Image (cartoon, rainbow, N blue to C red):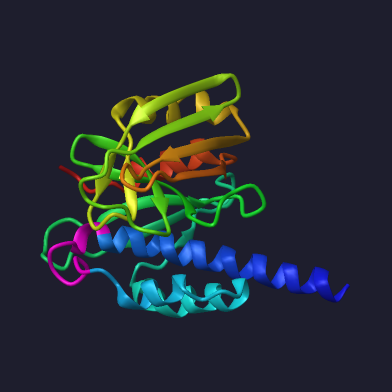
Amino acid sequence: MVNAMANFGIAELRRRLLLAHLGGAALLVITVGQTAGQPDGNLEHCRAVIDDAARLRCYEAATKPSTKAVPQALGPGAGTWRLVRTKNPAGGPEAVSVMQTADITKSDLDLAGMMLRCGESGVEVLLVLVSPLPPRAHPTATVSAGSISEKFSATVVPPGSAILLPKEATTLASGPWQAARELAVQIDARESEPNTVRGVVPLAGLGVALTRLRANCPSP
């Protein structure tokens, strides 16, 4: 019983961390080159912590400043998807996205979740990581929903905590993915230090979340 409660506590802590990290990723994407472009020494310190629970608490504390982008529930039909609005510190339209955390029971620690955001030419699909990738990395992402599996060449989004999938992923999110329960993800990322990140992102409520996102995207 004690172990079960401890495991539940760690799982809940990780869920909160991933949600905060996804919100932080939305903030980092638009602040790169200003205050968020430098590596975070606190996160580097956290990676060296051996104990799982202590490491997660360290990450949670290190990401607290990013809670300026607070995820909000989307309401009935959207499952556990969250809407995030982030003011652009340089002025201009705010950044708007919907996000879903990875299934903590089926995912590596490095997979935070998936984000769909309003882009200049429509909705964009991103996968969010806990450990940033080098800017010059050339990751590939294999995503599978039901019988549909695709391998994409992705682009690292500065400062490295997210990768952008091509437009074909948006087409899948607008159609076939909405009929699936979950999206299986495999990211092959580091060329100099080969590393594969695997996990699962729940898709329940994706259709409603995508509709709400498009309704909240800034006008061109």
Q: Nearer the viewer, residue 84 or 49?
A: 49
Please identify the residue farthest to the right as the structure is shown.
1
Question: In the displayed structure, does residue 32 sit left or right of residue 100?
Answer: left
The residue at 36%/78% (across/down) is: 42
For image coordinates 31% across by 46% down, the residue present is: 192
Given residues 142 and 17, the one toward you in this image is 142
Task: Decide if residue 215 is in sight here.
Answer: no
* Image height of 116 relative to 49, above or below: above
Q: Main secondary structure of the magenta part?
A: loop
Question: Residue 130: x, y in percent?
Answer: 43, 59
Magenta-drawn stretch contains 31: yes
Look at the image and tell me in which quarter the N terminus lies: bottom right
Within the magenta stretch, is there residue 51? no
* Residue reaching furthest to the front: 192
- What residue do we see at 50% from left, 35% from top? 207
Residue 30 quadrant: bottom left
Provide the residue span drawn in magenta. 29-38
Q: Is residue 1 left or right of residue 63?
A: right
